[in-house]
Image (cartoon, helix red, strand yellow):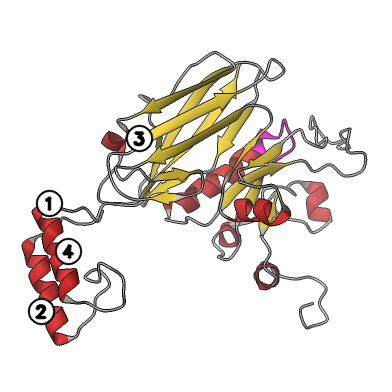
Amino acid sequence: MIPGDDPTWNLEDVIVVVNSQGGVCYAAHPEGHRGAVAEALDRVPWVTEDYDLTGYNGLQVWNMINNDYERDLGLEQWKRLLLNGRKDVFVAGGSDAHGDFSHATTVLGDFDNAFGKVRTCVYTKTLGNNEILNALKNGHSIMTDGPLVVFNITNNHGETAIIGDEIAGRDFSLNLQWVSTSEFGNVDRIYVHQGITGENETELSDLSLTPANLEGNITFNDLQSYIPSDTDSYIRITATTDKGYRVYTNPIFIKELPAKITVVDAVIALEMAVRGAHDADADVNDDGRVTSLDALMILQVAAGSIDIG
């Protein structure tokens, strides 16, 4: 418990307590609690300063089906965080299923909060509490009320990033897979969204699809042509079905390419090695010191014989 007599904890205190116990901290419907009833109960939605706090892991922005307004407000705040360079906040969906889990208990408006109507799907290699929590903490998840869409990105080294991961390199390819059922309908639109840190988010319309089927997969080998080299960016996917169901993925983050390395950089590194100076960029092998080996590796990069990007 937090010291003090006040039974109301502020958000910073809650985040500290959750993290101190090794927990995973998601905000439950941060855009909820609007209107006269909420005000009477002294319950309010999050404001921008709340979203800008650090230390929490995600936002449950989709709470109940047919509640698009609340969901979309939360998504806009989340996109703002992503474009500001936040790589530690993810989204999830869920039901606010109080009482009978099989039925809606909401009587104010056309909502349905029955258990499982909106859900979060996580990726784990093994099934267990720790694995599920770790997936949520690292954004290895999607939120959906029906269809599933997953994707990964592979670079020129053959390294593959899954949803929630970060990847560096070049020559990226995007591997996309989708599946639905007759209950939820054919996947009719798949949107590929790109966000550029410090700028804005746009749809990569050349990569977006209109499959009109229950399942499929595709690989775009030319993703690199859309990736800026001088700043960080991210890719995320949304999709809809012809029956009105939808899915949202968390992003994969793409690191900017390092500046072009020249022979001059190798000379500078060698001079640093002689002086015993240190610089993280020159410490290529990341051993805490700059040596002639680092200078040699930088020279090889400048000559094009090796690639450390």
Pick the front one: 24 or 28: 24
Above or below 59: residue 145:
above
Judging from the image, what secondary structure is the residue with disc 1 in?
loop
Which residue was labeled with disc 3? 173
Q: Amino acid at mark 1?
A: Gly
Q: Is label 3 in contact with label 2 (beta carbons under 8 Å)?
A: no
Assign the N terminus to one quadrant of the image: bottom right
Q: Amino acid at mark 3?
A: Ser
Going 44% across and 45% down the picture, which residue do you hit? 161
Judging from the image, what secondary structure is the residue with disc 2 in?
helix
Which residue was labeled with disc 2? 271
Q: Quadrant of residue 202?
A: top left
* Residue 261 visible in the displayed image: no
Q: Nearer the viewer, mark 3 or mark 4?
A: 4
Mark earlier in primary sequence (3, 1) = 3
In the image, taking residue 56 as reference, residue 259 lies left or right, namely: left
Q: Is label 3 in contact with label 1 (beta carbons under 8 Å)?
A: no
The magenta segment is 61-70
Going 14% across and 86% down the picture, which residue do you hit? 275
Q: Quadrant of residue 98?
A: top right
Mark earlier in primary sequence (3, 2) = 3
Which residue was labeled with disc 1? 304
Label annotation for residue 297: 4
In the image, taking residue 37 as reference, residue 141 lies left or right, namely: left
Q: Amino acid at mark 2?
A: Glu
Residue extending farthest to the right is 100
Pick the front one: 285 or 150: 285
Judging from the image, what secondary structure is the residue with disc 3 in?
strand
In the image, taking residue 22 as reference, residue 228 lies left or right, namely: left
